[in-house]
Each structure stands twice: as structure tokens, then as C-alpha cells.
Amino acid sequence: MTPRLLRTVGRALGVLGLTGAAVLAPAGQASAAPQPIGRCTTSSGVVLAVDFSHWGGPVYRSCGTTPTTGYELLNQGGWRTTGTGHDGPAFICRIGYSGHQGGKQYPTSQQEDCVLTPPASAYWSYWHADPGEDTWEYSQLGAMSYRPRPGSVDLWIFGGTNIEGTKGRPTVTPDQLRAHNSRPVGGDPAPKPDPVRTTQRPTQDDQAPPPPAEKPSGKPSEKPSKSASPSATSSPSPSTSATTGTAVAAPEKEAKVVDAAPAADAEHDSGSIVPVAATAGLVVVIGGAAVFAAKRRRREQ
């Protein structure tokens, strides 16, 4: 092996070593930290909200400090995500919170295997609302690239949203989720799954009068329970990747907003780091063996 070739191999191994270190390094290690929801204000901290209503759950909201990224905000304080095997951890395929269903991530592996990119009809879409704004903006950046402003709101919803963000928009408003206090209040709330406040979503059923009672009575008749009617959802063109299943939407008549107390961080499943790291390590070992053999031959000559 010529000296020039040795130098080339050495440079390549150096690049691979740096790549492997970057791959194996934990993501999102900045100064941000989870906080009780009362620590977020109109000008400090970021409110994170995740809507689990697709599976009959509430809208959880929590608080994180800044500076931070959307990805770090979604991977601290008991929150965790799973990426895809095709796109890596940056594409949020599953989301879970340790205070909800034992930390179970949604969609489940039976609904989405997270190997390829999920279709546009069933994926987690990312939304922002800056301080004072009551209109959602569909994120044009990935969670690892976006840096929320102090006093803003981040929201993740599951369903069908087109790439322009004009279809499949959130049904809850930023004002229902953001912090309204100008100063930090309260302490660390107990991690109870009870809703903090309930926001009625306007539906036709809510405006319909109850049917008349069959017999006159001194006591008012009980209002019959409402039957759930499927909501009309738009279906944008799906991605070319296939999915193992599609979760059936469960329409919510109420948006239950629950404060998610900070919890212990869970392990993250990126969906792609292991094979990439193994490949980089194998290449480094093979290259190192080649360099060692070449030097040994030079000493023997």
C-alpha cells in the first residue's frame, strides 16, 4: 500500500470516526429542562401539547424551558418518541408519555410499524403558535431544527394533514393551551391524570334540543346520551411508502386538556441508530485492519 493510499485511508477513517461519534451521541443535550406547567408564562418557557384524542385520550400539555428544540421538548419530562427506520429519529412516528397508559406510544406497532415513512393520511403533524397568536402555523421545519420562542405553544396532532397545512388542522386553539399567567405560579403538581379543564368543541349534536318526554311528570326527564357520529376527515394524498395498518379515528366531542406533570425520562427508540452505528463501526474495524497490515508489510520489507 503506497503512502498516498495510506493517507487517504487515514482521512476516511477519521471522517468515519467522527460520524460514528455523532451517531452514538445522545440527541437533544442542551440547557432545556421540563418544568411544572405553572412555571410557563406569557413570555417564558414553551408549552408542549400532544393530542391523543385519536385514541380516545386527552390533550396533554406540559412546560419546558428555553432555549430548546421541538425534538428536545418532546423527549424530556416523561415524553419519548420513536423515529422510522427509513428517516431516522428526526421523523416523529410514535409519541408516548409515561403518565398516560403506562408510557405506551401511539400509534401502536400493530397500527404503524415505523419502518417506512407513514402516509400523509395518518401521521403526527407539528404545529406552532407564537406568543399572542391564536392561529396555528404548520411547521415547515423538522422537530430537530425548529426552536420555539419563549411564551409560544407547540402542538402535535395525529391524523391526515397535507403538506401545506390547509387540511387536517387542529380542532383546539392555541389560546386553550397557552400560559395566561405573566409570572410563574404554583409548584410541582401531583401527576394525576384528571383533566384540569374541559373545553367544549362545537358540534351539531350540542345544539340539538332534547326530545320531548313521553309522559308529563313533575320531574324533568333525563336527557338521553348522545351517540357519536363520525366526523368528516379529509384524506390528502398518501406517501409512496406502505403502512401495516391505519388507526380508526375516534371523534371527540370534548377537548380534555390535562396538565402533564414532569416525570422521569424514558429510553428513546430512534428506529435507526443501531444499524447505522454498527455499519460505521464495521467499516472502521476493516479499515484499521488494512492499515495495520500495510504497516506490517512495510516493516518486513
Image (cartoon, grey):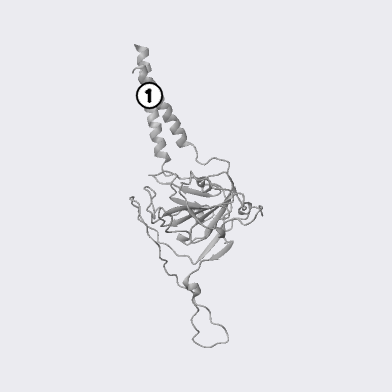
Viewer-closest of 279 and 19: 19
Res 293 visible: no
The amino acid on which the numbered mark 1 sits, given as a three-letter code, is Val
Splitting the image into 4 quarters, where does residue 87 fall? top left
Tell me where residue 107 appears, x and y as whole percent.
43, 54
Horizontally, is 54 left or right of 175 in the view?
Answer: left
Q: Is residue 115 left or right of residue 193?
A: left
Q: Which of these two is toward me, 33 or 103?
A: 33
Q: Residue furthest top?
A: 301
Q: Residues within 10 Å of mark 1 (few under 14, many from 20)?
A: some
Q: Nearer the viewer, residue 204 or 112?
A: 204
Q: Residue 7: x, y in percent?
A: 39, 21
> If the image is split into quadrants, where does the N terminus sit?
top left
Q: Which residue occupies 36% across, 18% down?
A: 4
Across and down, in percent, residue 246 comes to 37, 57
State the residue at coordinates (56%, 83%): 220
Q: Which residue is mark 1?
A: 9
